[in-house]
Amino acid sequence: MPLVRWCRERGVRDAVVGGFFVRAVSEPLGEVWIDGRQEPSTPFDAPWDAVRACVHVDGDAIRIARRDALPLAPVGDLLQAGPLLVADGRSAVADGADVEGLSIGARQFDSDITVGRFPRAALASTGSRLLAVACDGRTDSDAGMTLAELADALIALGAESAINLDGGGSASLVHAGRLRNRPREAGGVDLLEGRAIVTAIVFDPRA
């Protein structure tokens, strides 16, 4: 269901869209682990499934990295999306480079998400804070962002590491119980609650 509706029904105040999904079967695209248990999902095409970026949460430790830099059987939670946007405070996006195979493997997506400006969502870590971001697009007044522009914007906000999450009509950011961006389908059609999604990253305040 749309993220804002899901948050409302469960009393969740803060969340951002998670990874990609296969629309026909509403199944996550890429690995999902919850409490150390792997959940059913459709894998990314090989060999890209072994490198496409993830966010890994183990207690209070949060790591954003490519899949091959993380444990094969992770403890805690893991969500695979990608590509990696920022590593060690520098952009991990380079023109003409397709390190994680998102362009080559575009058949698994609605389009080649590496080309052009789209509505985007991302999660970043500054080392002391997490940044959940979303940008709108698909209208004359909201152009969206390229992956490189998104990476540069996150670096300007202090990101040490960052990962691209699901975008397009799925790009959704909820803060204090309200949807803070304006999701749109191709052609600029407004989605008042956003597209129905399959995974999300939820932020729970610590006591």
Image: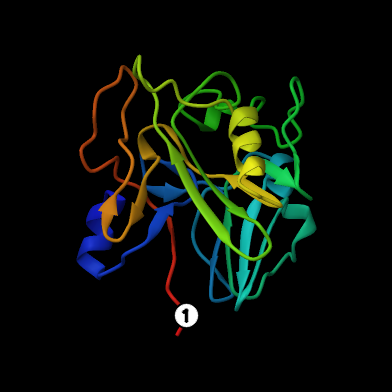
At x 56% / y 60%, what residue is drawn? Answer: 130
> Is residue 194 visible in the rendered structure shown here?
yes
37 or 159, which is in the foreground? Answer: 159
Q: Residue 127's image quarter?
A: bottom right
Q: Residue 40 appears at what percent x and percent y?
A: 49, 59
Horizontal side, residue 63 vs residue 25: left or right: right
Residue at which label 1 appears: 206
Horizontal side, residue 162 vs residue 38: left or right: right
157 or 33, which is in the foreground? Answer: 157
**Colour pattern of the rendering:** rainbow
Horizontal side, residue 207 vs residue 5: left or right: right
> Is residue 31 visible in the rendered structure shown here?
no
Q: Residue 104 appears at what percent x and percent y?
A: 67, 25
Q: Is residue 5 above or below residue 164?
A: below
Q: Residue 163 appears at what percent x and percent y?
A: 61, 47
Q: Residue 22's image quarter?
A: top left
Q: Is residue 2 above or below residue 34?
A: above
The quarter of the picture where the C terminus appears is: bottom left
Q: Residue 54's image quarter?
A: bottom right
At x 75% / y 20%, what residue is drawn? Answer: 96
For numbered disc 1, what is the local secondary structure? loop
At x 61% / y 42%, what residue is drawn? Answer: 154
Residue type marked 1: Arg
Q: Residue 43 appears at what percent x and percent y?
A: 58, 47
Outermost bottom residue: 207
Instruction: Give the crowd class for mark 1: few <14, some 14-19, many >=20 residues within 10 Å.
Output: few
